[in-house]
Amino acid sequence: MSDVHDDDRLSELAVQIDEWLAQLAAANPSVEAVDRSDDDAHRWYVRLRGDEKEHITVWLVLGQRTLRYEAYVMPAPQENVAKVYEMALRRNEKLVGAHFAIGVEDALFLRGELPVAAICAAEVDRIVGSIYAYAEQSFPAMIRLGFASQFTN
């Protein structure tokens, strides 16, 4: 079982994550926005400008044991449903640190988590970059398959 971190340690780490995300935003022109939730929860989002998908928003949530992260990829497919979900499952084999998951209203998400002890600037950068790349690589084929009739004309 992973270590449980106390509120003081999590608050210190949250400040570091704020700094790392600010540095990421300053250094990467694809980052459109970085923000942190107003409540007491340790939640952030990083909004990125995509090429294939107009925007990709990576949510980060710091808990006592893990940093969870996710990004919405696409709504539930209206056509070729089984094929779209199969494509996502097959792509999972190649992903590192994230996986496709079916979420609210059967939408497709990319999700992952990292133990709190492993969080550092390089890992936060890797998470955001990987989720961005996985969404960009997967979105075109999945959306065309899941909404095929809208692409034929």
Image (tube, rainbow, N blue to C red):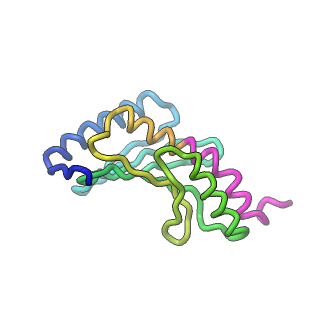
- Give me the residue at 46% from left, 46% from top: 97
Residue 1 sits inside the magenta stretch = no
Q: Would residue 40 appear left or right of 110 to someone viewing this image? A: left
Q: Name the one closer to the observer, 83 or 58.
A: 83
Residue 140 sits inside the magenta stretch = yes
Instruction: Residue 50 in the image: state x and y as whole percent.
Output: 59, 42
Instruction: Report how many numbered discs are placed on residues in the image.
Output: 0
On screen, residue 104 above or below 17? below
Which residue lies most toward the top here? 27
On screen, residue 116 above or below 148? above
- Give me the residue at 31% from left, 53% from top: 37
On screen, residue 95 above or below 24? below
Which residue lies most toward the right here? 153
Q: Would residue 93 appear left or right of 144 to someone viewing this image? A: left
What residue span does the magenta drawing correspond to?
Answer: 133-153
Where, quadrant-wise, is the N terminus in this rendering?
A: bottom left
On screen, residue 121 above or below 141? above
Instruction: Residue 82 in the image: state x and y as whole percent.
Output: 68, 69
- Give me the residue at 73% from left, 57% from top: 144
Instruction: Residue 88 in the image: state x and y as whole percent.
Output: 61, 57
- Give me the residue at 51% from left, 45% from top: 131
Q: Name the one closer to the observer, 79 or 89.
A: 89
Prevalent SS, magenta region: helix
Where, quadrant-wise, is the C terminus in this rendering?
A: bottom right
